[in-house]
Amino acid sequence: MISPIIPDKLKIGDTIALVSPSAGLAPFAMHRIDSAVSFFKDQGFKVKIAKNALQNAGYVSATAKERAKDLNEVFADPKVKCVMTTIGGNHSNQILPFIDWITIKNNPKIFIGYSDITVLHSAIFAQTGLQTYYGPCAMTQFGENPKVFDYTWENFKRVLFAGPAEKKIEVKPSEFFCEDTSLDWFKREDLIRPRKIEKNGGWAWWREGRAEGRIAGGCVPSINHLLGTKYWNDPRGSVFFIDIPEGASYDLGLAVSEADSCLADLANAGVFDDIAGLVVGRPYRYSEEESKKLREIIIGYAQNKDYPILANVNIGHVDPIITLPYGAPAVLDSEAGRFSFEH
């Protein structure tokens, strides 16, 4: 994996642009957008909202060309320093043919989001070499009531803010996690009370060992959209991460059978053969039994290898979450209980 182009860090007064390259949920939960915008302004940032970011056209925000145009325009805007997605979805792949890769390469800036945004992370890196960030979205994290979780915000700042920064970041488990889906955004029930939290039992080393490699990976099944395309990044030698999302509804995680099918795609593509280490995010709303089955599946696909496997990490579809820089050098070390990366 080549060394990435690193965008400039964020400074107070910079402009953050919001885009919706996939799902069009913003108009149905505008209070989440309003909360995110207010939060950033309170921190001293300016906010720009792309033309179609607050639109809805069924299961997407706008046409593929319109969504791509939004992305092209905010990257071309010299005032914008950070491009943040409002939410994920399942259709970022539609906009790939219409993205202006030259504009993105010539105007490197922070690009952040998770879930289906995996598609854009991989494509941007493959086409331009720009480092992007798997991390919080505007609606899901920064629209939280009463505010974004401190763990999410502190990890965001550690990676993306300018100033005397740590060159090496040691990732630590959060003290709690939150999977409360009982509050319906679209009925504004999330404004009634904060979501319930649960004590975090910490990480689980599914296999011990030590590994070094650049960060790659993403959300299944989104990452599977890229297999065999020019937007796929060769994960050989990487510290590869997997994020397991919601399933048929927000109350359910991705069915274990579907997760298994997605992981089989990655196994058939040779992903589990030549990576240096594997990081598994806490799967969305999995029971103890489902988590146990997922462990068996993943170890099965990696059974002839000896690299370390770290699970239950605060990545993607659980709150609070870390911010991961694609292409950054990372270390897994079970003996030291360490997951770290340089940025």
Image (cartoon, grey):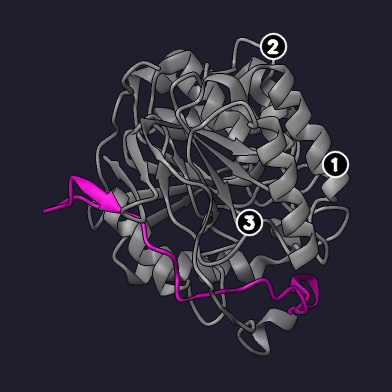
Q: Say which label, 2 or 1, has the lower sequence index.
A: 2
Helix, strand, or loop for circle 3?
Answer: loop
Q: Give amino acid for label 2.
A: Gly
Q: Is residue 159 left or right of residue 122?
A: left
Residue occupied by mark 1: 258
Residue 117 screen position, x and y as percent: 60, 39
Instruction: Please identify the dominant SS of the magenta region.
Output: loop
Residue 227 seen in render: yes
Q: Give amino acid for label 3.
A: His
| Stretch of the chain drawn in magenta | 161-188
The quadrant in which the N terminus is found is top left
Q: Nearer the viewer, residue 70 or 251?
A: 251
Residue occupied by mark 3: 317
Q: State the mark number for residue 228.
A: 2
Q: Give the residue displayed 49% in from the left and 16% down from the top.
A: 126
Q: Give the residue displayed 78% in from the left and 52% down from the top.
A: 293
